[in-house]
Amino acid sequence: MSDPGDPAARAGRRIAGWVGAGARDVASGLARGVAGGVRWPDHEVRRVQRRTLGTLVVAQSLGGIGITIGIAVAAILAEDLSGSESLAGLAQTSQVLGTALASFLLAHLMGRRGRRPGLVLGYVVGAAGAALCVVAGVVEMFPLLLVGATLLGATTAANNQSRYTATDLAPPDRRARSLSLVVWATTIGAVAGPNLTGVAGRAARAMGLPGLTGPFLFGLLGILAAGLVVAVFLRPDPLMVAREAALDRGVSTGRTSTSWARVREVIRQRPAVRAGVAALALGHGVMIAVMVMTPLHMHHGGATLEVIGVVISVHVLGMFAFAPVVGWAADRFGRPPVLTAGALVLFLALFLSGSSPAGASTTIGVGLFLLGLGWSLCNVAASTLLSESAPLDARTDVQGAADLVMGLVAAAAGVVAGLVMDGFGYVALNLFAAVLVTGVATAAEVARRTTQRGHRGADTPAL
């Protein structure tokens, strides 16, 4: 057994907080590794984490343009091509469904090859989807638009996985803040994107293309730039570093392929993981259901594309701009209180947006801002909760499964949103979303009781 005062043993304990599982095994294992030469001591882990966060911030800023610039016109283009209001939500729903499917595939690839190949593939597929959306508008083919939107969802999946990438090497007391920094970075491109809607439309018309295809063309450029940044600068791969650091100290890193049996086992045994997945999926479903139909609600009231773009920008501002504060709160006060606050903010948002008239109004702007803020509270807290509650050998599996469930729930919510909007109106849509928020509140309470009963140690292993 190593001497507790030995420098190698002390190094083992330090890195145990960064990349370890069982602290006792980690310390002794790493102490042996230091004696033989450790490739990833704690100061090197910190260096890689700083580089990782910097790369992700730039990539998210660029990728945010590709994700959000088409949001303001997706439903309008879908209605124009399909000739049906009830089918208008299918474009965004297809993108959400594509995100869900891509989350599974990217998680599988990341588990085998690391974060960088998965993120790059997501951006490449998303760029192809944006290109197909442009072609669909030119040839006026609604099915092709749905195919393009589905592929475009891979960009969202890549951006979602980026937030988990930020936690691979983060110390336990800064996990939520590291995750939230990457979420915040989306603000730059995400807020700029919808505001470029009018400019993109004019640019498309100047090129002889339909005006509604312009935002997708601009988004294509942003997505390609994000993929290039990741491909060049996300080196070394943070997930590979975490695994190599574990191997240095003789700790098994588990499988390198997706095992759904293991995911089911983790979800069944760990209440915090169940609560995190439920809050993440339902909170995202609420946001998608209302957001995709709001441009149509405003359009029917005579609002211009520029005004719709401003409202969506305000909504996206709420989603991402305050993420660092949310991350700080989640680290300071815990994940369950932040989830509860998210549910309360979502209830208020639905009340305001549901009571707003068609067209442009201050009420709908405030409602959409709070809808984004409520989503941010739920997303940051739930993502951190499920990531830290999953064991190392199943972490990428659980993250991929959580994003898959989140996407499927959001896709279903988008389909129902179109039907409710067509049959009963915008007020009924917000009432439907409020039902989903009750699930978020319930998940927050489950997480709180789990922590109070002393399960936190079992559910939040160090990484």
Image (cartoon, rainbow, N blue to C red):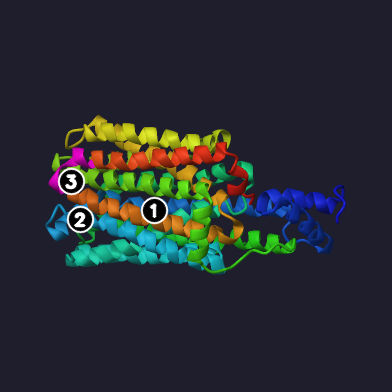
Q: Find the magenta span and give its range.
A: 421-429
Left or right of residue 117: residue 42: right
Q: CA distance from mark 1 to mark 3?
A: 22 Å
Left or right of 10? Residue 136 is: left
- Label drawn at residue 77: 2
Examine the rendering and report whether any part of residue 428 can be seen.
Answer: yes
**Residue 37 shown left or right of residue 268 in the figure:** right
The residue that mark 3 highlights is 421
Confirm whether the magenta stretch covers residue 426.
yes
What separation in Å lies between label 2 and label 1 (alpha carbons)? 25 Å
Residue 424's x, y, as percent?
A: 14, 43
42 vs 276, nearest the viewer: 276
Q: Is residue 82 above or below residue 17?
A: below
Three-letter residue code for mark 1:
Met
Task: Say which residue label 1 marks.
Answer: 406
Q: Residue at x 37, y 33 (%)?
A: 345
Instruction: Name the residue nearer the viewer: 418 or 450.
Output: 450
Describe the element under mark 3 as helix, strand or loop.
helix
Residue 49 in the image: state x and y as whole percent: 62, 52
